[in-house]
Amino acid sequence: MAERATWKGPITFGLVTIPVSLVTAQKSEAEVKFNQLDRRNNARIRYKRVNEITGEEVPSSEIVKAYPYSKDQYVILEDEELEKIRASTSPAMEILEFVDRDAITPLYFEKPYYAVPDPAAKRGYVILRESLRKANKVGLARFVLRQKEYLAALLPVENALMVVLLRYPEEVRLPSQLDLPGEDLAAVNASEKEIELGLQLIEMMSAEWQPEKYKDQFREKLLASIEEKARTGAISVQPAGEAAATTEVIDVMELLKQSLEKKAASE
């Protein structure tokens, strides 16, 4: 079954227009979802929209969107007004500029989508994709999705043009805003020798990126436990050992040496 498009519209690239559909790159079926039941009779729990003053249920036709302008003051926006605002913005995903592929840190990445070209737009799609690949650049685009204007990064991934929604600067907490140790090793009583041992351990543990090697272990145990309880009426999961909590000074050098020895012995 084809994935339903989240957004449809043209990518504008100079004078080139490339009609595309956005489909999410995330699989929703991988998430384990629960329903809430009344323990007494296993009936599903339902939520109602009620008026906080009268306690009465409110029909959907009487529910409006309102912006909290100030304390107990709201600006109500009707659907027709929202539609006018939406119509006044460009329906296109407009590429504003291009930046180096490594210039955007993962801190700004929010959600990935694939741009799928309309049948008649494949030529322009390939030209944009391969131009980005050869230039090692990312296109920065602006478009409206679900009543919000997003900044997005367009980048080639295999045969796809990926559209990654980006966070705006005001949505991001920078490392400089946290109390973090700097690069001065002496300030934390670290040494170059410990860095060298750390590098050796990293080198010994280095591997090719193979995402298929990694599984959501909690999800697998959860599904297995659900299946077991459905079959037997009980769950027999062994608890994991607790991590040791300590306030003692840790000998990092010794731990790094032990880690190197353990890794070497396992090879």
Image (cartoon, rainbow, N blue to C red):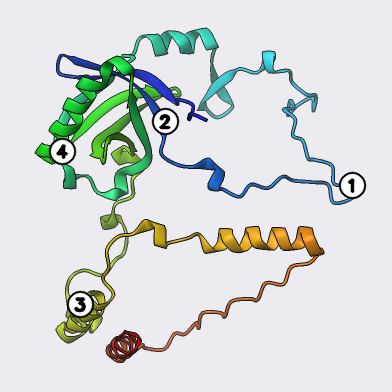
Instruction: Mark 2 vs mark 3: give the one in front.
Output: 2
Of the pair 109 and 211, the residue shown nearer to us: 211
For image coordinates 71% across by 58% down, the residue present is 227
Residue type beneath disc 3: Leu
- Sequence-wise, the earlier of marks 1 and 3 is 1
Q: Which residue is mark 2?
A: 23
Q: Secondary structure at mark 2?
A: strand
Q: Position of residue 21 (x, y in %)?
A: 38, 23
Q: Position of residue 73 (x, y in %)?
A: 56, 23
Q: CA distance from mark 4 to mark 1?
A: 58 Å
Q: CA distance from mark 2 to mark 4?
A: 21 Å
Instruction: Mark 4 vs mark 1: give the one in front.
Output: 4
Q: CA distance from mark 2 to mark 3?
A: 40 Å
CB of mark 4 within 8 Å of CB of mark 1? Answer: no
Q: Which residue is mark 4?
A: 133
Q: Secondary structure at mark 4?
A: helix
Instruction: Mark 3 vs mark 4: give the one in front.
Output: 4
Q: Position of residue 65 (x, y in %)?
A: 57, 20
Does residue 10 appear to the left or right of 139 in the view shown?
right
Q: Is residue 215 above or below residue 104?
A: below
- Sequence-wise, the earlier of marks 2 and 1 is 2
Of the pair 196 and 245, the residue shown nearer to us: 196
Q: Is residue 29 above or below residue 129?
A: below
**In the image, farthest residue toward the right:** 41
Q: CA distance from mark 3 to mark 4?
A: 32 Å
Q: Which residue is mark 3?
A: 199
Residue type beneath disc 2: Val
Q: Which residue is mark 1?
A: 41
**Quadrant including the C terminus:** bottom left
Q: Position of residue 84 (x, y in %)?
A: 43, 8
